[in-house]
Amino acid sequence: MRYYIADCHFYHKNLLTEMDNRDFESVEQMNEVMLEKWNKKVHARDEVVILGDLSLGNGEETNEILCRLKGRLYLIRGNHDERYLRDKDFDVSRFEWVRDYAEINDNKRKIVLMHYPVFCYNGQFRRGADGTPLTYMLHGHIHKSEDQVLVDRFSTETRAMMRKSAHQETAQPVPCQMINCFCMYSDYTPLTLEEWVECDQRRRNKADR
């Protein structure tokens, strides 16, 4: 099984009172709850793609977190990951790879991975014969902020555009699929692509009410 998650921010104490206002009494409690939720879902051989900003801890602290997290881990580098990645005490071997950008396949669909949202991502117009989107852009970085409103607005307007491709007889709406895998949207739990699609739709429906 393959899961995705972004912006866990282990050890980031300020997020308890600023920006996210996470509902924890301490950063230690936050770390333990996130570890518990992760390991309840993920098994040892599962893959987890971390879409940046895993930890604000130093190398030793982040090593301790990684040793307790289940799964085969892949890191898309975020703006807050440099602190531990550059620490001489950090053991990078816990990650299968560390990249700034990646394109992978997940059950016959292209997945574009980056910490920051990419508005015109590779494969954005691709649809299957039944109209199903074939490419998804998964990202993090913006948390639940004003930037999320702007990304949603762009996605909505793009989906309303009609476009005819070489493989279609008639124009169809652009299947723009930009999903913010922010950990708070999933209750700090890594999700599969299908689960993120459902989670994103529920969030959009709630925002439209």
Image (cartoon, rainbow, N blue to C red):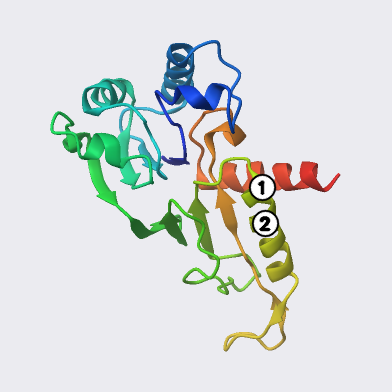
At horizontal 33% and vertical 55% (from top left) the residue drawn is 100
What residue do we see at 37% from left, 31% from top? 55
Residue that label 1 marks: 146
Query: Are the two marked residues, 2 and 1, in contact with CB atoms closer than 8 angstroms?
Result: yes
- Relative to 35, does residue 203 appear above or below in the rendering? below
Percent coordinates x, y for residue 42 in the rendering: 41, 28
- Element type at mark 1: helix
The location of residue 150, given as percent across then percent down, is 67, 56
**How many callouts does the rendering have?**
2
Q: Residue 38 carries which label?
A: none
Q: Which of 3 and 65 is in front in this view?
A: 65
Q: Quarter holding the C terminus?
A: top right
- Residue 39 rendering spot, x and y as whole percentages: 41, 22
Q: What residue type is labelled 1?
A: Glu
Mark 1 residue crowding within 10 angstroms, few (<14) / some (14–19) / many (20+): few
State the CA–CA distance, disc 2 to disc 1. Answer: 7 Å
What residue is rendered at 56% in x and 15% in y?
24
Q: Is mark 2 on a helix, strand or loop?
A: helix
Q: What residue type is labelled 2?
A: Leu
- Examine the image and state in which quarter residue 162 appears: bottom right
**Rendered image quadrant of residue 49:** top left
**Above-or-below relation of 115 to 3:** below
The reply, left or right, for residue 189 in relation to residue 133 is: left
| Extreme residue toward the right, this view | 209
Q: In this view, does 167 lie above or below 44?
A: below
Quadrant showing the N terminus: top left
Q: Residues within 10 Å of mark 2 (few under 14, many from 20)?
A: few
Rendered image quadrant of residue 196:
top right
Which label number is shown at residue 150?
2
Residue 43 location, x and y as percent?
A: 37, 27
